[in-house]
Image (spheres, rainbow, N blue to C red):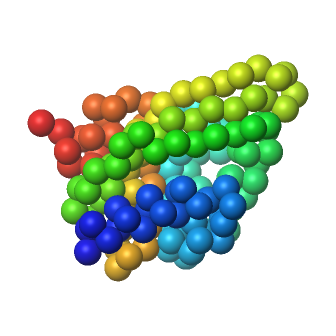
Amino acid sequence: MSQENVDALKQALSEAPDRPDRFFALLDDDVVWDPGDGFPGGKVYGRDGVRDFFRHWLGAFEDFRSEVMECIDGGSSVYVHMHQSGRGKGSGAVAQTDFWQVWLFFEGRVVRFVQKRGEGEAREAAGLSE
């Protein structure tokens, strides 16, 4: 099932800009979404909470892009290295950064998402530390 999780997540992330419904369908109704330090509001709970999070987050940017750099099967979790960039609507400033994410699956749905700014932290959270 783990490779299926990797494939489903890669597809959902690549289609998210045009088909957000497919992305949100991958999330469990009671998903726990932890975007990590630096994001206002902290953890978000439930699929509707994640929708609101993205509405607020993406609403601050023009030309927002997100690219999967690496995706690793971690058994019941998927480890993702993500590069994101965009231009602030208010300031026009260009922002870009890399995040490392852990997506925990149960029965084909994402039940927990954790995002870290450091690769080592994320690898440890995904059970991939050496």
In the depicted view, which residue is nearer to us: 4 or 116? 4
| Residue 49 visible in image | no
- Residue at the image position 75 percent from the left and 29 percent from the top: 87
Q: Please state the total of marks drawn on the protein image.
A: 0
Quarter where residue 7 is shown = bottom left
Q: Position of residue 76 (x, y in %)?
A: 27, 65
* The N terminus lies in quadrant: bottom left
Q: Is residue 29 left or right of residue 41?
A: left
- Residue at the image position 60 percent from the left and 26 percent from the top: 96
Relative to 4, say whether 69 is above or below: above
Q: Is residue 56 left or right of residue 77?
A: right
Q: Is residue 124 left or right of residue 87?
A: left
Relative to 50, say whether 86 is above or below: above
Q: Position of residue 34 (x, y in %)?
A: 50, 49
* The C terminus lies in quadrant: top left
Q: Position of residue 88 (x, y in %)?
A: 78, 29
- Residue at the image position 87 percent from the left and 28 percent from the top: 90
Residue found farthest to the bottom: 107
Q: Position of residue 29 (x, y in %)?
A: 55, 76
Quarter where residue 100 is shown = top left
Q: Is residue 9 left or right of residue 50?
A: left
Residue found farthest to the right: 90
- Residue at the image position 43 percent from the left and 73 percent from the top: 109
| Residue 3 visible in image | yes
In the depicted view, which residue is nearer to us: 119 or 31? 119
Relative to 50, say whether 94 is above or below: above
